């Protein structure tokens, strides 16, 4: 999967501006994180869609972090030169409030992977 696949397939046109190193890191993370056998094999449309959505979800978080490298400002002080920054939280798969996260949650709810191991 290429980053252009994410931008056009998710679709997520705003993610085209994400730094190329972040793009490569996200794609590598997605490949390592998502098991093709759970989603019907490497050629399964569901597997491909899950990868696109996860990459878009992580890409949006990275884009927001890129804009606020240290996190959003939560406090300031003038004379003492104090500035507080919030930490940018990690995004668990399907936990973001993006439309891609919502679609991932929908896919998870309707997948056999949701059931877990039954003995």
Image (cartoon, helix red, strand yellow):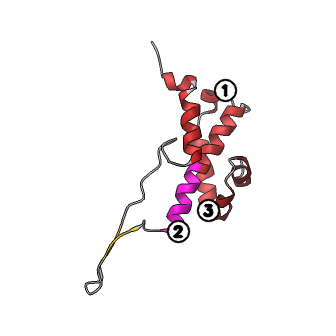
Q: Secondary structure at mark 2?
A: helix
Point out residue 25 in the picture as x, y percentages from the top left corner: 59, 55
Query: In this view of the protein, can residue 28 be seen by the observer?
Result: no
For disc 3, the marked residue is 21
Position of residue 83 relative to residue 47, above or below, is below
First reached walking from the N terminus: tag 1 or tag 3: 3
Whole-number angstrom distance, CA of label 1 to CA of label 2: 37 Å
Q: Main secondary structure of the magenta part?
A: helix
Q: Is residue 99 left or right of residue 3?
A: left
Name the residue located 55 percent from the left edge and 43 percent from the top edge.
101
Point out which mark residue 40 bears: 1
Query: In this view of the protein, can residue 20 be seen by the observer?
Result: yes
Q: Which residues are magenta?
A: 57-69
Q: Do tag 1 and tag 2 residues touch (Cβ < 8 Å)?
A: no
- Residue, far left: 80
- Residue, far bottom: 79
Position of residue 38 relative to residue 11, above or below, is above
Point out which mark residue 67 bears: 2
Point out residue 54 in the picture as x, y percentages from the top left corner: 59, 44
Q: Do tag 2 and tag 3 residues touch (Cβ < 8 Å)?
A: no
Mark 1: give few (<14), some (14-19) or many (20+) Cα within 10 Å: few
First reached walking from the N terminus: tag 1 or tag 2: 1
């Amino acid at each position: 999967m290429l980053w252009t696949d994410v931008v056009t397939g998710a679709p997520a046109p705003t993610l085209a501006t994400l730094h190329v190193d972040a793009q490569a890191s996200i794609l590598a993370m997605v490949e390592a994180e998502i098991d093709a056998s759970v989603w019907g094999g490497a050629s399964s449309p569901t597997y491909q869609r899950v990868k696109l959505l996860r990459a878009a979800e992580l890409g949006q978080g990275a884009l927001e972090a890129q804009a606020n490298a240290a996190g959003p400002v939560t406090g300031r002080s003038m004379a003492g030169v104090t500035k507080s920054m919030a930490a940018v939280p990690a995004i668990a798969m399907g936990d973001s409030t993006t439309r891609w996260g919502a679609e991932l949650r929908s896919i998870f709810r309707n997948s056999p992977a949701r059931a877990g191991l039954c003995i």
